[in-house]
Every structure is written in C-alpha cells, then in structure tokens.
C-alpha cells in the first residue's frame, strides 16, 4: 500500500484549521466579541479549501467521510476537555463507534 503524503498533508491542514475555526466559533458564542467571528471565518475558509483538496485528491466516498468523522470526534473532545461541555455515556458510545468505523471504511480488514 502506497502512502499518499500529499493527501495526508491536506488532511492535517484541514483538521488543524477546522479545529481552530471551531474554537473561534465557541469563543464568539461565549464572549460575543466580533473578532472571534472574523478569525473563525478566515480559518474556515482555509478549512473549506483543504476539504476540497481532500475530495479532489482522495475522493468523496472514503477520504472525505473519514475526515468528517475525525473532525466530529476532535470537536467533541475539544468541547468536553477545553470548554467543559457535558457528554453522556451513550454519546461516548457513538464516538467509539465512529472510531471503529474508520478502519472499516478504509477496508483494513478486507482481503483481496
């Protein structure tokens, strides 16, 4: 299996800027300072461009789906541990199932 380093780099950029954009959105919600809105918008513009690169380079069905799952999980973790948002047990179960879904979507257990 050949590793596509370009795709991994684009995914890293997407995840970093998406997380920072989400944090800015939360800070805007907490403080109502407009600066967080504008910073978040700029960060999310980079996120959108990176996501489009992911779809172009890696595809929509697999690469984009995995990135979206990871983005959601990172958002939940940041929300819980940084901002103290509550997560119920069944929601943690959903997060674990999302993590289990990643290798299944990648086809790691599929034999050719």
Image (cartoon, rainbow, N blue to C red):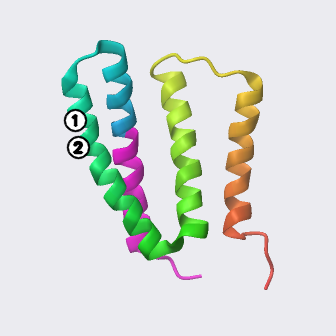
Near-viewer residue (75 or 3): 75
Q: Residues within 10 Å of mark 2 (few under 14, many from 20)?
A: few
Which span is picked out in magenta?
1-19
Dominant SS of magenta comes to helix
Q: How many numbered marks have been drawn onto this rendered protein structure? A: 2
The spot of residue 9 in percent (x, y) is 37, 64
Q: Position of residue 23 (x, y in %)?
A: 37, 30
What residue is at 28 percent from the left and 53 percent from the top?
46
* Residue 45, percent from left and from top: 28, 50
Q: Is residue 91 magenta?
A: no
Viewer-side residue, 59 vs 19: 59
The residues tagged by marks 2 and 1 sit, at their Cα atoms, a distance apart of 5 Å
Q: Is residue 43 above or below residue 106?
A: above
Q: Secondary structure at mark 2?
A: helix
Label drawn at residue 42: 2
* Identity of the residue drawn at 54% across and 68% down: 60
To which quarter of the image does residue 63 belong? bottom right
In the picture, the disc for residue 60 is none
Mark seen at residue 39? 1
As helix, strand or loop, the secondary structure at mark 1 comes to helix
State the residue at coordinates (79%, 86%).
112
Q: Is residue 5 magenta?
A: yes
Q: As displayed, is residue 14 above or below residue 26?
A: below
Furthest residue toward bottom? 112
Residue at left 46%, top 69%?
Answer: 55
The answer to whether residue 98 is above or below residue 51 is: above
Q: Quadrant of the N terminus?
A: bottom right
Q: Is residue 92 left or right of residue 43?
A: right
| C-beta proximity under 8 Å, tags 2 and 1 | yes
Relative side of 110 to 80, left or right:
right
């Amino acid at each position: 299996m050949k590793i596509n380093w370009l795709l991994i780099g684009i995914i890293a950029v997407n995840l970093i800027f998406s997380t920072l954009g989400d944090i800015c959105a939360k800070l805007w919600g907490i403080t109502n300072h407009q600066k967080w809105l504008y910073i978040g918008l700029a960060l999310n513009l980079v996120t959108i461009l990176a996501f489009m690169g992911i779809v172009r380079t890696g595809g929509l069905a697999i690469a984009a789906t995995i990135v979206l799952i990871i983005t959601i999980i990172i958002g939940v973790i940041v929300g819980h541990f940084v901002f103290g948002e509550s997560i119920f047990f069944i929601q943690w179960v959903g997060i674990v199932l999302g993590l289990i879904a990643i290798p299944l979507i990648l086809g790691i257990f599929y034999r050719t």
